Image (tube, helix red, strand yellow):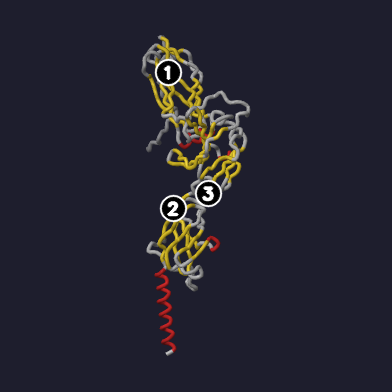
Amino acid sequence: MLRSASIALALLMGFSASTARADIDITAVSPSPAVIGGPVTVRGRGFATPAENRLVFGDYGGAGEAEVPAGRVVSWTDTRIVVNPPISAPGRYFFRMTVRRSGEGGLGAISTTDSDGISFDAVLPRPTIRGYRKSDVCPGSVLEIEGENFTGIRGAFRILWDKIADGRTYGVGLRDDAIVGWTDTQIRLSVPNDLPAYIAPGDTYQVVLAESQGSGVRSVARGPRAQLASGCGGRPTIAPAATTPGIGTWHGLDFTLAPVPKAVGVGDDLVFGGTFEAKTEELIRCLRSTPLQVRWRIVRDGSGGSVAQGEVRLNTRRKGLLARARSVSVGTYRLELNLVDPPRDVRFRPDLGGATVTVGAARLDRKVPLQPRVEPKPKLNPKVLRRPVSP
């Protein structure tokens, strides 16, 4: 009798455990998407208590899964759990609930029909710029930018400096070493003093936080317009060039022509050589990821056409050019260079110096007279091998 009662009790306990497992269900995660650094609410039923069940958090990026630490659980009821998940980067994550039972050696039943639990996306918090503690600073001084949600976006957003002049905006991306302090409510920025075309005393400016989007950037937060101090040693005389955020500062791309002969003859080669050079570090970084193309052609004055043409691909700090053509008629020849689809923030300044090559009527004859070919005489071998003759 006692044994029958024990078996019945064991069957009842097994039934109850399986029923409890079946009743666990996660139905929603909010907010959607979740914001990195903020709380996440998991809703469902059958959550019971942390002593009975465990909430598992996982990353689809390959980092695996683990139980949410007790220190990150804000509240827990049978239908609602609030946690601060350990998310450090945007991506896709998941939750699942497992039964905590002694002797099971780890994770128990999965709470949903999806083997990966319930999925959700996490995004960076949207920053807000309220203003500047002191806006009228000089280039070389520290500008304190005040706002909210700065901590989670460090390293994911670029700081752009927009100069407003004559109804137009000229943007430049600031280097990471310009940042001297960063908290959740304040960014301390050392205002560069080596970009006079964009940042100069008395300028009207605006600080922008932007994120990469395809080949360009998208502004996420804009600060108010303000004005730099005017008594900082005078304004530069160089006018700014129209630009879009991307490569960064106003960039110089130079070309220096190598010496060329002043005159050659008809039929001789016309040779123009030289070196392209990127003048800023940011332009050099851009060339490595997105090379520029320069078309060259050799033209004869008055003909309207080219006698030779080609392209050179710029992907390093310095790049050589060798343009060659055969002179076919008398005249003056010159080299022309054109940057293909130039970005608006790149200024191409080829230093051709008005160099030309004049082709005269007489060809410079450098041929060597032909000499009659003498065939070498065969050499006779004085040694003759004789085979012995049998008697």
**Residue occupying the point 39% across, 11% down:** 330
The answer for how far apart the CA atoms under marks 2 and 3 are is 15 Å
Pointer 1 residue: 269
Q: Please determine whether, in this image, residue 144 is positioned above or below residue 42.
A: above
Q: Nearer the viewer, residue 337 or 381?
A: 337
Q: Which quadrant of the figure contains the C terminus?
A: top left
- SS at mark 1? strand
Q: Residue furthest bottom?
A: 1
Asked if the residue under mark 3 is in contact with the one under mark 1, i.e. CB atoms within 8 Å, the reply is no
Q: Name the N-terminal-most of marks 2 and 1.
A: 2
Question: Is 301 on the left or on the right of 149, as rendered?
Answer: left
- SS at mark 2? loop
The answer for how far apart the CA atoms under marks 1 and 3 are is 62 Å
- SS at mark 3? helix
The percent coordinates of residue 190 (x first, y second) are 60, 37
Q: Name the N-terminal-most of marks 1 and 3.
A: 3
Q: Quadrant of residue 369?
A: top left
The answer for how far apart the CA atoms under marks 2 and 1 are is 67 Å
Q: Name the N-terminal-most of marks 2 and 3.
A: 2
The percent coordinates of residue 296 (x first, y second) are 42, 24
Q: Amino acid at mark 2?
A: Pro
Q: Nearer the viewer, mark 2 or mark 1?
A: 2
Pointer 2 residue: 33
Q: Amino acid at mark 3?
A: Gly
Pointer 3 residue: 152
Q: Amino acid at mark 1?
A: Asp
Q: Nearer the viewer, residue 325 or 186?
A: 186
